[in-house]
Amino acid sequence: MDQKIRILVIDDDNLSRLGLCSIINQQPDFEVVDQIGCVLNELALIKNIEFDVAIMHLKHPVKQHLYLIPACLENMKRNMRTSLLVLTESVDEADIIQIVQSGASGFLPIDSLPEEFYIAIRCLYNGQFYISPDLAFKIVINMGKYSDYKGHILLTPQQSKVLRSMVNGRTNREIAHDLGISERTVEAHARQIYKKLRVTNRTQAFISALHLGLVDSK
């Protein structure tokens, strides 16, 4: 069997955590490698855990717990290939936008079907991001309410190609191969794209690009 996707579950609720672990372990290519609580002192343990995807159950109200996302990501910096999927009870557009803006690579409502949960985990493992299509559409439609940045974005032709590839879930290595440039050049383009869009990661770039009409959602 191919290498399993190593998953870290972050959840304060014992029953919820056990339920997530049970659902995850039903997949032969998934493995829960550890479980920790969603509190600052336990998030510090992340530095010593080897995993590919972290799944965080963020409690309601979201605004009161958002600080846990950057705290988690800070402790994940040691391994830049790891990604964070956030689960919440809320499907409020403002909450989801704040979760994305905080740096999460994906978002799902806690009551999502297992099949979509599995899709999201595999997307994040492959360097992509995931927000369910219905919620992504709602965010794009309503994003203007929560952003004061509506200026015209001017990307170079190469930056537009890189952004389109990023939105399509291509990794930096794949983009470099597709465009015949180095990974370092792709990274440089990505930094300029993030700067122009006023975002900090691919998930935010995806939402912003759709909102501003720089790419389509197909």
Image (tube, helix red, strand yellow):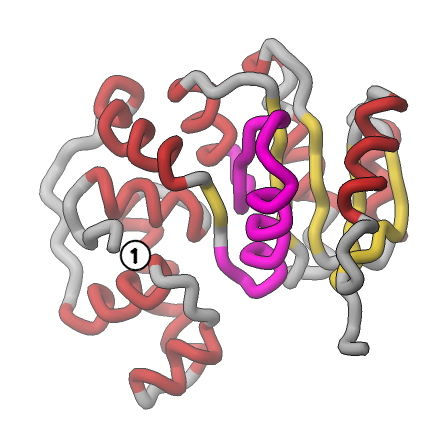
Name of the residue lying farthest toward the bottom: 180
State the image coordinates of residue 121 (x, y, percent, origin top left). Answer: 63, 51
| Nearer to me, 132 or 185 | 132
How many labels, in total? 1
For the point 85% across and 28% down, the residue is 37
122 falls in the magenta region = yes
Q: Is residue 69 left or right of residue 190?
A: right
Q: Quadrant of the C terminus?
A: bottom left
| Nearer to me, 27 or 193 | 27
State the image coordinates of residue 203 (x, y, percent, origin top left). Answer: 43, 46
144 falls in the magenta region = no
Is 63 situated above or below 133? above
Q: Quadrant of residue 199?
A: top left
For the point 31% across and 59% down, the residue is 192
State the image coordinates of residue 15 (x, y, percent, origin top left). Answer: 87, 22
Q: Is residue 183 left or right of residue 28?
A: left
Is 68 situated above or below 34? above
State the image coordinates of residue 147 (x, y, percent, origin top left). Answer: 27, 25
Q: Is residue 40 visible to us here?
A: no
Q: Quadrant of the N terminus?
A: bottom right
Q: Is residue 51 left or right of residue 208?
A: right
For the point 23% across and 28% down, the residue is 141
Q: Is residue 86 visible to us here?
A: yes
**Start and end of the magenta stretch?**
102-128
Which residue in the protein does label 1 denote? 193
For the point 55% across and 57% down, the residue is 123
Which element type, helix, strand or loop, lies under badge 1?
helix
Q: Is residue 89 left or right of residue 17?
A: left
Tell me the crowding category of disc 1: few under 14, some 14 to 19, or many 20 or more residues within 10 angstroms, Cα based. many
